[in-house]
């Protein structure tokens, strides 16, 4: 790779080199294209390395989580079946050398099993149970403002802007004999 990888600042900054001719522009586009090619190659290599690491991580985590879950279920099942051996009297937990087993009781809980049925019921009888959160439909807002010309409070319409883009033609990567910028 070029000196970009070594963090050595040898390329001029935008303040020290300004193109003055089409030839300068041609040269700059060539450099940009070569660096883009290096970036693409580096990105592809990094992506391949990440894929290998992700695959190894996935395999390891799958085995580790299965093992932990198996042991967790076995311990919980045993503890529930043998509560009197784990804790005595009013105690709710027991510290062991490698962890703690705790028993906790919860109160009644309300669980929504059919949201549509609940919403239909609440709309008829108990609107105070419903929570409505308004959201902006951006497409509808754009159509409204651009067709009517009315700009609601909290909305700005920006003037169109012209942008300039660069498209480079890929070149071979930079080598030691590459022309340096003036």
Image: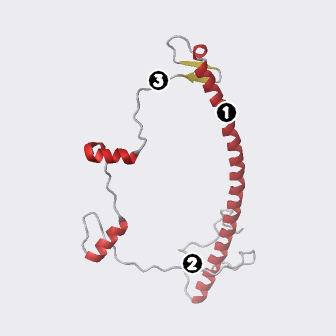
Closer-to-camera residue (79/29):
79
Seen at 35% across and 64% down, the residue is 137
Q: Closer to the N terminus: mark 2 or mark 1? A: 2
Q: Residues within 10 Å of mark 2 (few under 14, many from 20)?
A: few
Q: Nearer the viewer, residue 44 or 180?
A: 44
Looking at the image, which is closer to me, 134 or 165? Answer: 134
- Residue at 30% x, 44% y is 122
Q: Residue at x 69, y 57 (%)?
A: 51
Q: Nearer the viewer, mark 2 or mark 3?
A: 3
Label 2 secondary element: loop
Viewer-nearest of labels 2 and 1? 1
Cα separation between marks 2 and 1: 65 Å
**Residue 34 rendering spot, x and y as whole percentages:** 67, 76
In terms of secondary structure, where does tag 1 sit? helix
- Earlier-in-chain disc, 2 versus 3: 2
Dot 3 corresponds to which residue?
A: 105
Mark 1 or mark 3, earlier in chain = 1
Q: Secondary structure at mark 3?
A: loop
- The disc at residue 70 is 1
- Picture coordinates of residue 69, whole percent (x, y): 64, 35
Image check: 150 left or right of 137? left
Q: In the visual, does 113 lie left or right of 134? A: right
Which image quarter holds the C terminus?
bottom right
């Amino acid at each position: 790779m070029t000196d970009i990888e070594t963090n050595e600042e040898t390329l001029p900054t935008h303040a020290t080199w300004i193109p003055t001719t089409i030839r300068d522009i041609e040269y700059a586009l060539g450099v940009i294209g070569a660096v883009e090619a290096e970036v693409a190659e580096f990105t592809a290599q990094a992506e391949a390395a990440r894929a290998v690491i992700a695959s190894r991580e996935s395999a390891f985590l799958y085995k580790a989580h299965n093992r932990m879950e198996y042991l967790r279920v076995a311990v919980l099942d045993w503890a529930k079946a043998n509560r009197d051996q784990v804790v005595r009297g009013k105690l709710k937990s027991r510290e062991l050398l490698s962890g703690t087993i705790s028993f906790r009781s919860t109160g009644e809980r309300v669980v929504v099993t059919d949201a549509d049925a609940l919403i239909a019921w609440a709309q008829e009888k108990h609107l105070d149970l419903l929570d409505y959160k308004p959201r902006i439909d951006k497409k509808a807002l754009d159509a409204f403002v651009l067709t009517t010309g009315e700009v609601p409070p909290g909305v700005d319409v920006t003037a169109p802007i012209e942008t300039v883009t660069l498209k480079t033609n890929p070149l071979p990567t930079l080598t030691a004999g590459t022309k340096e910028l003036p």
